[in-house]
Image (cartoon, helix red, strand yellow):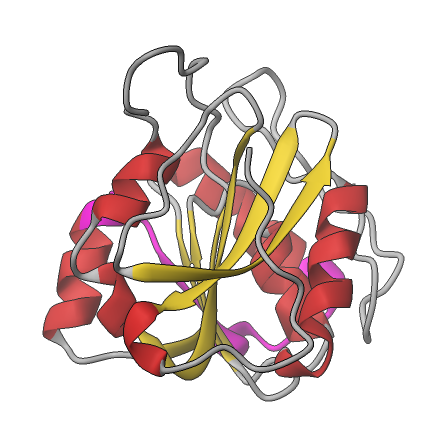
Amino acid sequence: MRIIGGTAAGVILDTPKGLAVRPTPDLVRQAVFNSLAARVDGARVLELFGGTGAMSLECLSRGALHAVCVELASRHARLIEQNLERCGLPRTALELRVQDVFTALAQLASAGQQFDLVLADPPFGDKTTGQRSRSLSQQLLDDARLPALVAAGGLFVLGHAKRDAVEVTTAWRERKALKHGDSWMRLLEPAGFGAAEPGVDSPAAP
């Protein structure tokens, strides 16, 4: 796993051993950042389910102003700090919150914080057959606090498994869906932002 673009391009990131973390594959991250393009430069970023911190670090490498990275496991948080140092990025550019994601959402929303990009690629959920998804991705879509954390013109980038047929709730409008193998990444905006800009790819159904 490596940083793909920007000042830290080519840096190999440390990843935890075992199956506790499923890092977003390089090809998937590349597709996401190709779609985000100039949105990253100068952005305020929130990464949920940080894991290795690859999404936050990729944003900072590409010129993001600041990133908040939320990761529950303390040993994974230490790995994120090591990866930040390995990338040669300023320590002050990353705020690492070692806590439950949904607790963090409540605290950030209560503080009135907003972000230009909210990125989340949580552990994959089970296959959804004849029932509504109960995955972490669906829980994020259902969380009433999350849309308020996205600044005007910002995006929520959400990953989930192809087998997990998440429901994009009425709180969100899908701008684009990226597919790679079993990984899906959805680019969403809060439904209250107004009409979608012309030229943006229409959403694809699972």
- Along the viewing direction, whichever of 125 and 69 lies nearer the viewer: 125
**Where's residue 82, x and y in %?**
61, 51
Where 181 falls versus 121 (above or below)? above
Q: Is residue 181 above or below residue 179?
A: above
State which quarter of the image contains the N terminus.
top right
Q: Which x, y percent locates residue 92?
A: 49, 78
At x 69% / y 77%, what residue is drawn? 199
Question: Magenta stretch: residue 100 in it?
Answer: yes
Q: Please give the name of the residue rendered at 83% of the width and 67% of the height, measured from the top-left corner.
A: 5
Kindly tell me whether residue 160 is visible in this rendering: yes
Q: Is residue 99 visible?
A: no
Q: Quadrant of residue 133?
A: top left
Q: Read off the magenta span.
A: 85-102
* Direction from residue 16 to residue 45 in the image, left or right: left
Residue 115: name its quadrant. bottom left
Question: Residue 100: x, y in percent?
Answer: 25, 43
Q: Residue at x 35, y 38 (%)?
A: 167
Please tell me which residue is depicted at 55% across the width and 39% down the height of the picture: 205
Horizontal and vertical percent for residue 97? Answer: 33, 57
